[in-house]
Image (spheres, rainbow, N blue to C red):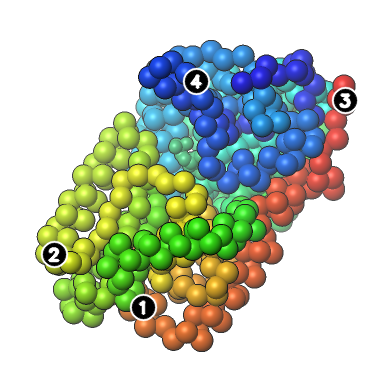
Amino acid sequence: VVPADAPAGTYVLVVVSNRLPVDYEEAEDGSVNWRTSPGGLVTALEPLMRSSHGAWVGWPGVADRDFEPFENDGISLVPVRLNEADIEDYYEGFSNDTLWPLYHDVIAPPSFHRETWEAYIAVNRRFAAAAAAVAAPGATVWVHDYQLQLVPRMLREARPDLVIGFFNHIPFPPYGIFAQLPWRKQILHGLLGADVIGFQRLADAGNFSQAVRRLYGYPTRGVVIDVPIGETDQGGQNGESRRVIAKHFPISIDSAGYEELARRPDIQARARQIREDLGNPKTLMLGVDRLDYTKGIGHRIKAFGELLADGRLSVEDVTLVQVASPSRERVSTYMALRDEIELAVGRLNGDFSTISHTAISYHHHSYPREEMVAMYLAADVMLVTALRDGMNLVAKEYVAARFDFDGVLVLSEFAGAADELKQAILINPHDIDGTKDAIVRAVEMPKRERTRRMRSLRRKVAENDVAAWSDSFLRALTGGAAVPAGISDD
Ligand code: F6P
C-alpha cells in the first residue's frame, strides 16, 4: 500500500462504483492485503485509469474501517467508509432487496422500506462527496450501477463543472414495473443529473426514456432527452434545458485476455484433467453463476432432471458441472435460494447418480480466472438460463475461451448477451420443454455446425470487447475524446 501522491481535486477521470477494484483482506496474523477483484470493469478501465491520471472511488468491502486514499497498481483508490448499518440498509436492503428484484422483472418480490431508502440517499451522498473532493476542475466522472443512481444529480449540484456519465450494469425495467417504486421520480431525477446514461440493451434505454416521459413529461428524441434546468441545477436559468443522452452500450470482456489464458498449455492440461476427474463423460455441460435467483439455476436443474428421467440423456454420458459462487449471503431471498438449489441438486443426484457417475457436480465457490477458463475449455455445452440478466459476461467468456471453435452455447433470450450472440441456441428458460429440446440439440450438434456457430459468436465478442465498450461510452460522454481532458496539475 503506497500513499497516493496526488493531492485531492486533481484527477481528470474519476470512476465511482459501489466496490473498489480491490477487496481488503486481513489475515489472522494481522497482515493486510488488497486483493484485486477479478471483475471485468477493472480490466476494462485499468489502462485508461493509469494513462489519464484516474481515481477510483468505492467501498473496500469491509465494514467500519477508514482508509486514506492510496495507490494500487498505478491506480489511485479512494475508499468510502460503510458501517454495519449502511451495509444492512443501503447495500443489502435498498440496493439488493428493493432495486435488484425490481429491476429484474420482480422475479422475487421487492421490499419497499422508507428507512432503507433514507440510507440509500445518505450513502449516495457520501460517494458523491468523495468523488467531488477528488475531481479536477472540468473532470469526467463515470458513475456505475444501480447502487449509486442518485450520485449523478448530487455531483452536478456540488460540481456543475464536471462531465458526468452513468452506466447501469443491470436491466432497466419496463414502466409498469418501475412505477411500483415509491421513490421512482427521485431515482429518475438522480440519474438525469448525468450527461450520458448508458444501458446494456436498447430495450433498457427505451424503458428509461419511457419512464422519463411518463413521470416528468420531458421530450425525448431518439437517444436525446431535453431536461429542463431547474433551480437545483446551479448555473442554469429556468426555461433552458440540458441535453442528456440515454443510449445502450453493451458491456463486454477482455476477450483477448481470455483467449490468451485458453491457449496456455497448463490451462489446457487442467481442462483435460477436469474431464478425466469427472470420469471422461461423453458430454460435459457447464453452468457458472453467482448464486442468484435471476440466473434460472433451478430451471436448468429441472430441465436436466427431466431429460435424465425421460432417458433422453444418461448419467453415464452426460455430467453437469454447476459453479454457484456465493453472493449476498445475508439477504433472506438469497438464503432461501441456496436451500432450494441445494435441495434440488441433492435430490437429482440421489435419484440419478451412480457410484461412478455424478449427475451434477455442484460447487458453492468462486474460482480464479485460470480455473474458469479451464472449465470453459472442458465444457462441450455451456448453459446460461437466466430469467433476467443485464448482460451475462459468462456467455461472452465462454465464447472468448473457445479459440478451438468448438463448444455450444445455450443462451437465455432474457440475458442482454442474447441481443448480440444470435448464433447461440436461444431459449426461453420458462419453457422447460423448449429448454430440454435445446439441451439435446446442443449435445447432439454436429461438429460442422458447432464450428460455424462458434466462429460467428467469436467474431461478435472480439469486435466489441471491453476496451471498445469503455471507449464508445467515453466518446459519447466527452464528445469524441476516448481519454478525458481536464485541467490537471500534470
Ligand atoms: O452488475 C451487478 C453487480 O451488482 C455489480 O455491481 C457487482 O459488481 C456484481 O453484480 C456483484 O455483486 P455484489 O457487489 O453485490 O457482490
Q: Which numbered disc, 4 or 2, marks the residue that appears first in the sequence?
A: 4
Whole-angstrom CA distance, mark 1 to mark 3, is 57 Å
**Quadrant location of the N terminus in the rendered image:** top right
Which amino acid is tagged 3? Asp
For the residue pair 334 and 374, the one nearer the viewer reads as 374
Q: Gap between marks 1 and 2, in whole Å?
A: 23 Å
Which of disc 2 and disc 1 is earlier in sequence? 2
Q: Which residue is rendered at x = 46% and y = 73% of the image?
A: 407
What residue is shown with label 2? 355
Mark 4 = which residue? 32
What residue lies at 66% left-to-right and 32% top-to-bottom? 73
Q: Nearer the viewer, mark 3 or mark 4?
A: 4
Q: Can you tell which of label 1 and label 4 is closer to the viewer?
A: 4
Count the marks: how many? 4
Q: Which residue is mark 3?
A: 490
Q: Is residue 190 above or below residue 201?
A: above
Give yes or no for contact between labels 3 and 2 (Cβ–Cβ under 8 Å). no
Q: CA distance from mark 4 to mark 2?
A: 44 Å
Tag 4: amino acid: Val
Give the mark nearest the N terminus, 3 or 2: 2
The residue labelled by disc 1 is: 443
Q: Residue at x 53, y 68 (%)?
A: 402
In the rendered structure, which disc, 1 or 4, sits on the residue that comes first in sequence?
4
Query: SS at mark 1?
Result: helix
Give the Cα distance between marks 3 and 2.
66 Å
Q: CA distance from mark 3 to mark 4?
A: 31 Å
Is label 3 within 8 A of ligand 1 (CB to nearest ligand atom)?
no
Q: Is residue 41 visible?
A: yes
Q: Is residue 171 left or right of residue 481?
A: left
